[in-house]
Image (cartoon, helix red, strand yellow):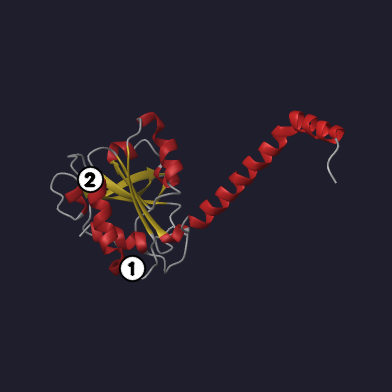
Amino acid sequence: MARSGSENRRWSTYLQYHWWKYLLLVVISAAVWTAVFDSLARPDRNEKVGIAFFGDGLDVQGLHDEVSGAIERLTDQQISVVDVEQVIVDRDLLGSAVTARSYDCDLLVLTADTADLLPAHGFFCPIPDDWEDVSVYSQERDGVYTAYGVKICGPGAANRFSRFCRDDSIYYVFLSRESVNLAGLNGQGSQSDDAAMRVLEYLME
């Protein structure tokens, strides 16, 4: 049965004042589906190894290729993403930057004077006690010095990582308190998820 003219007018008037509700429904539906697909595509935290270099002069692509090419023989852990990021940030904003990125990376590389701006116990995991013959970065708390960082590049450094650093400053690598890839060293993740530790050991060779 054909719709009467009055019904058409009522429908036209309704759409004139309520069209935005349908548009909003379409936008929300699209946003929900996008979020769902992004969530499904995002790797689990233990499937990603991340390195954040806080400074200038890093060969990001070269380091990424080096780690990506070695990751399968370094660990039995299934790693789908290797992320290497160079972060240049104002010193006054460093704390916020490290906090924001500590959930996205496992290894953070900073100079000693940059690390001095942070309370290390709140940002980094202490390095293993059995690491020997390495130059470390320590901070004092309540009269006790704890080692949080290991020298990874600078004058005289001849390890694998230093080949990708064009900066003459001394850099230390720190272990994120939030990483799930440190073999449980920081109380996070499983002991079998050791990819970040294996990568660090590889880069220090």
Residue type at mark 1 is Thr
- Can you tell which quarter of the image residue 12 is in? top right
Q: Is residue 16 left or right of residue 187?
A: right
Label 1: few (<14), some or many (≥20) within 10 Å? some
Indicate which label's residue lies in the foreground, 2 or 1: 2
Q: Quadrant of residue 197?
A: bottom left
Number of other residues with Cα within 10 Å of mark 2, as a class: few under 14, some 14 to 19, many 20 or more: some
Whole-angstrom CA distance, mark 2 to mark 1, is 24 Å
Residue 23, by quadrant, is top right
Against 162, residue 68 (above or below) is: below
Residue placed at 46% from the left, 66% from the top? 190
The mark nearer the N terminus, 2 or 1, is 2
- Up the image or down, 39 lies above or below 193; here it is above
Please provide percent x and percent y for residue 146: 36, 50
Residue carrying label 2: 59
**Count of all numbered marks drawn on residues in the image:** 2
Q: Secondary structure at mark 2?
A: loop
Residue depicted at x 21% and y 58%? 133
Whole-percent x and y of residue 131?
A: 28, 60
Q: Which residue is mark 1?
A: 75
Marks 2 and 1 close (CB-CB < 8 Å): no
